[in-house]
């Protein structure tokens, strides 16, 4: 049976690196490459960390590309600095030189090239804003025929967003960050007829990164992948942190862990609710991950990272 073709587009947050790590352990997936969008990161350390992670996983055959898109609302610097910290973790700095290639094409150009030369339809695994996807579609509208579906970690349907009211000027607290960074770009994708499967905050709020989980990773430190994942999660454990991108990515290997639900939605692009993924009758139909078997999900991560 043919492996599922996947092109990943992440934006350099801690959970993005761990989603990349998880993707590399999946036997049913053929990764075509990794695009890094300059949103929840500083782009150069994010590119560097991504390439080092692929080296750690023995996947230096997978190219990395730097997207040059820009958002409307910047992620806070305190979030973005994590890309610098992860890039300096000793476990991914044991080699003198990075082996994983950085392609010359921009991330959006690489996305177009990868889709057009793919022998069959490709799943876009997007764990950051949808801006690079929108830019690729603008460059080459014909790529729509090569996209099987977009799996997107983003949006908040029936819960509050994670863009805090009061901290972001003029925001009412309804938006999720990946949508808020560039709601216009997200809406561009929303206006297509491409299949979209969301992993919204409604679900990720139920799957926190716990001290217990990090301690279990610590007991697996003899495995380099568990060691790296544990170090990353230790960085963020003092705050409220959830399995955002990792939860979305795990769907590729175990869709049976999840229950899905269809919603009619609109993407709000301006005003105090910009970046809100609003449930609205007559809106664009999307599927969203609605429930997950938490026990199986946690166990799956621990087992996959035992290498």
Image (cartoon, rainbow, N blue to C red):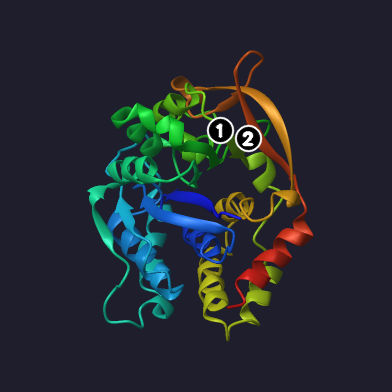
Q: Quadrant of the C terminus?
A: bottom right
| Residue 26 shows up from this direction | yes
- Residue at 36 percent across and 73 percent down: it is 88
Q: Quadrant of the N terminus?
A: bottom right
Badge 2 crowding class, 10 Å Cα cut-off, few under 14, some 14 to 19, many 20 or more, is some
Vertically, is 120 above or below 85?
Answer: above
Which quadrant holds residue 238? bottom right
Horizontal and vertical percent position of residue 290: 72, 39
Outermost residue toward the top? 282
Vertically, is 15 above or below 229?
Answer: above
- Residue at 54 percent across and 78 percent down: it is 227
Whether the residues at callouts 1 and 2 have beta carbons within 8 Å, the answer is: yes
Horizontal and vertical percent position of residue 147: 47, 37
Q: Which of the numbered marks, if any, corresponds to residue 173?
A: 1
- Residue in the foreground of this view, choosing between 242 and 65: 65
Vertically, is 279 above or below 132?
Answer: above
Q: Is residue 12 left or right of residue 158?
A: left
Q: Which of the numbered marks, if any, corresponds to residue 160?
A: 2
| Residue 242 shows up from this direction | no
- Residue in the foreground of this view, choosing between 114 and 262: 114
* Kind of element beneath mark 2: loop
- Residue at 68 percent across and 76 percent down: it is 216
Q: Is residue 74 left or right of residue 212?
A: left
Horizontal and vertical percent position of residue 4: 55, 51
- Residue at 55 percent across and 55 percent down: it is 3
Vertically, is 204 above or below 282?
Answer: below
């Amino acid at each position: 049976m043919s492996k599922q073709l996947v092109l990943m587009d992440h934006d350099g947050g801690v959970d993005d690196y761990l989603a990349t790590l998880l993707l590399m352990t999946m036997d049913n997936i053929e990764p075509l490459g990794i695009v890094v969008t300059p949103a929840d990161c500083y782009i150069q350390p994010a590119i560097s960390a991504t390439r080092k992670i692929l080296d750690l996983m023995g996947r230096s055959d997978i190219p990395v590309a730097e997207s040059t898109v820009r958002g409307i609302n910047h992620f806070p610097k305190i979030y973005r600095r994590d890309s610098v910290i992860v890039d300096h973790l000793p476990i991914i700095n044991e080699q003198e030189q990075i082996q994983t290639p950085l392609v010359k094409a921009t991330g959006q150009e690489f996305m177009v090239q990868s889709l057009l030369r793919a022998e069959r339809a490709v799943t876009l695994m997007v764990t950051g804003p949808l801006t690079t996807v929108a830019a690729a579609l603008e460059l080459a509208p014909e790529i729509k025929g090569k996209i099987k579906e977009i799996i997107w970690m983003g949006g908040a349907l029936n819960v509050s967003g994670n863009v805090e009211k009061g901290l972001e000027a003029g925001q009412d607290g309804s938006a999720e960050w990946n949508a808020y960074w560039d709601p216009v770009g997200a809406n561009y994708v929303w206006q297509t007829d491409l299949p979209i499967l969301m992993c919204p905050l409604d679900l990720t709020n139920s799957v926190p990164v716990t001290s217990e989980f990090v301690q279990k990773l610590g007991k697996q430190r003899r495995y380099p992948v568990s060691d790296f994942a544990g170090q990353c999660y230790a960085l963020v454990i003092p705050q409220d942190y959830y399995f955002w991108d990792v939860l979305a990515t795990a769907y590729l290997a175990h869709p049976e862990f999840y229950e899905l639900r269809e919603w009619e939605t609109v993407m709000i692009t301006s005003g105090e609710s910009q970046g809100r993924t609003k449930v609205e009758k007559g809106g664009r139909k999307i599927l969203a991950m609605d429930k997950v078997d938490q026990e199986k999900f946690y166990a799956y991560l621990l087992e996959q990272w035992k290498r």
